[in-house]
Amino acid sequence: MRCGIGILALLGATIPAIASGQETGGSLAGAWTGVWVRAADTLTVTMRFGEQDGAWSGSFDSERLRVEGIPFQEIEVVPPRVIVRLVGDATTTVFTGRVEGDSLTGILREGEDPGWFALARDTAATPDLCEEEIRFRNGEVELAGTLVLPRGTGPHPAVVFLHGSGAEGRWASRFLAGRLARDGVAALIWDKRGVGGSTGWWPEATFEDLAADAAAAIAFVRTRPEIDPARVGIHGHSQGGTIAPLVAARSGADFVIASAAAGLPMADVEVFSVGNSIGLASLPPEEAALARAYVEALVDVAYRGAPAAELEAAAERARGHAWYFDPPGPDDPYWMFSRRFADFDPLVWWGQVEVPVLLVYGSKDERVPVEASRAAIVGAIESAGKAPVDVRVFDGGDHTFRIRRPDDVWPRTVEGYPDAILEWLRKVMYFSGS
């Protein structure tokens, strides 16, 4: 077990302690705290770097972005010059700088947008959490993760984090895991099958497979002496929130936190999500009608098995418009994923939940229809009459509970999140937070 070592250790440090140049030299290795600046926006960050067998690795934390341990994809060090690449879903940010003693400075560029960064070596961190690298199994699949424990002997309540869609590793939930652990709740974050240290292959997994992985995670956590086995629940965001009731049924979880959970047929949710991605709501009426017809044709083929010719005809009518995008190619995994999940009905499973539920949404979620999903899920739970349900909708929050002010380059967290989750856990699980 490692207590407070690694990417959780320096969260919240904003004024670094400067080590002497004689002790640290010009090495990139270690933690650096400072700012990234673009336009009029300043983001406080901590960057960490390490070297093993000549290969560099690194990550960054930002409390404003609500992230910890987000990995850099490429690091090139030719002292004193450093080049670091951060590859996101849509953009790549390149940091080009120099290490001079205890200073790391340079320029950053995302596309054509320039900025700069300035950081100082940080030696002020003090351990406040315990981390343990763990492994557990679901049949032939071995899953790797990190158990984040609060200080104290326990036994602690615990949250097992579920994954969103795609190749999600444990880093995606690390920030919230740290917040929970500092408030007295242990957290298990882990790599999805086929990601990071986990075996298996997520593109071939069904929702039942993913739920079985999560049930194995919960069973593992309940064996730990630091954990109260009667207070182990789940937190799932997006796809994880959507399948949360299935996981609860398979695992006997003691409570459920479902974040941005879809409560409609999967095809309807896809129409909503794809439509928002092309700005359908802002198009003139005739354009919007054409765009909606194209999106619905795509989803009909992908989710409902409609003939491909219908999509080809819709694409021919839509091609050339600014919002148009080509359909995925015939070998694209999109078609396999869509058909695999098309028949999943979350309401069937919500009607079987018998433990406390918290539903959490951002009012401007661009991926999930909030009001329709909320109403459907609450209706299914209340009709069954087996579980209490609470709902929090954060005004202005997007799918990840973030907002942008007019001058923001980087988003910021909507007010009240994630504190509402901690407050609900205190109420439901009867423990004293920090």
Image (cartoon, rainbow, N blue to C red):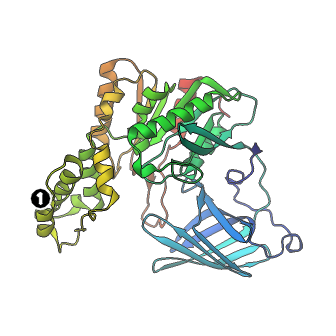
Q: Please give left or right for residue 123 compared with residue 269 in the image.
A: right
Residue 385 placement: quadrant: top left
Helix, strand or loop at label 1? It is helix
Residue 4: x, y in percent?
Answer: 74, 47
Relative to 353, is 285 on the left or the right? left
Residue ID for mark 1: 310
Above or below residue 214? Residue 356 is above
Residue located 35% across and 46% down the image: 363
* Left or right: residue 230 compared with residue 5: left
Q: Is residue 275 above or below residue 433?
A: below
Q: Position of residue 190 (x, y in %)?
A: 57, 45
Q: Name the one closer to the observer, 276 or 80.
A: 80
- In the depicted structure, whether residue 49 falls above or below residue 176: below
**What residue sits 32% from the left and 46% below the top?**
368
Q: Residue furthest top?
A: 385
| Screen quadrant of the N terminus | top right
- Residue at horizontal 43%, vertical 35%? 244
Residue 227 higher or lower than 21, as above or below: above
Instruction: Please provide percent x and percent y for residue 337.
Output: 33, 50
Query: Is the C terminus in the top left, top right, bottom left or bottom right quadrant?
Result: top right
- Give the amino acid type for the residue marked by disc 1 in the picture: Glu
**Residue 299: x, y in percent?**
22, 53
